Image (cartoon, rainbow, N blue to C red):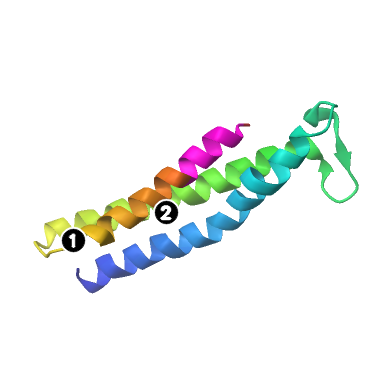
Amino acid sequence: MDSKALGLYYGSMIVYMIGAIPLTLYALIVRPIANMYHEPISQMVSPIFGNYGAYLRDLFIISLVFVTVSVVLYLISVQRTSWGRKGISLPTIITPVVLFAFAYILLGVAGI
């Protein structure tokens, strides 16, 4: 990997880690708690977040944007590495793919 591709690779992982915060909030904490209530989420109002449905939607969109930007940076780094005819190890390629698959599956299971 050249230095530019390596920087893009590390950048994609940093963006993924930053995006993991709203992803965890949305899919593992806030959404399951919201589903336990017997009233529609779109009608719920929180004194801190305001409209609860809008808060959940915004967390979903923020998570989706961060993960997608991370995927794009990762793909650019892999493409630059293949253009440079340099080798890249299989664990270096597979680990982010597993993380991205986990994130998209988690967002899909949690739903909007």
* In this rendering, position of residue 27 left or right of residue 70: right
Q: State the residue lying farthest toward the front.
A: 36
Residue at the spot 29% in from the left edge and 51% down from the top edge: 75
Return the residue nearer the eye: 100 or 73: 100
**Mark 2 or mark 1, which has the lower sequence index?**
2
Q: Tell me the amino acid under the disc marked 2.
A: Ser
Looking at the rendered image, the quarter that the C terminus falls into is: top right
Secondary structure of the residue carrying numbered label 2: helix
* Quadrant containing the N terminus in the rendered view: bottom left
- According to the picture, the residue beneath numbered tag 1 turns out to be 81
Judge whether residue 97 is colored magenta. Answer: no
Residue at which label 2 appears: 70
Image point (41%, 62%), residue name: 13
Query: Residue 33: x percent and y percent?
Result: 76, 41
Q: Is residue 104 magenta?
A: yes
Write down the region rendered in magenta.
103-111
Mark 2: give few (<14), some (14-19) or many (20+) Cα within 10 Å: many
Q: Quadrant of residue 34?
A: top right
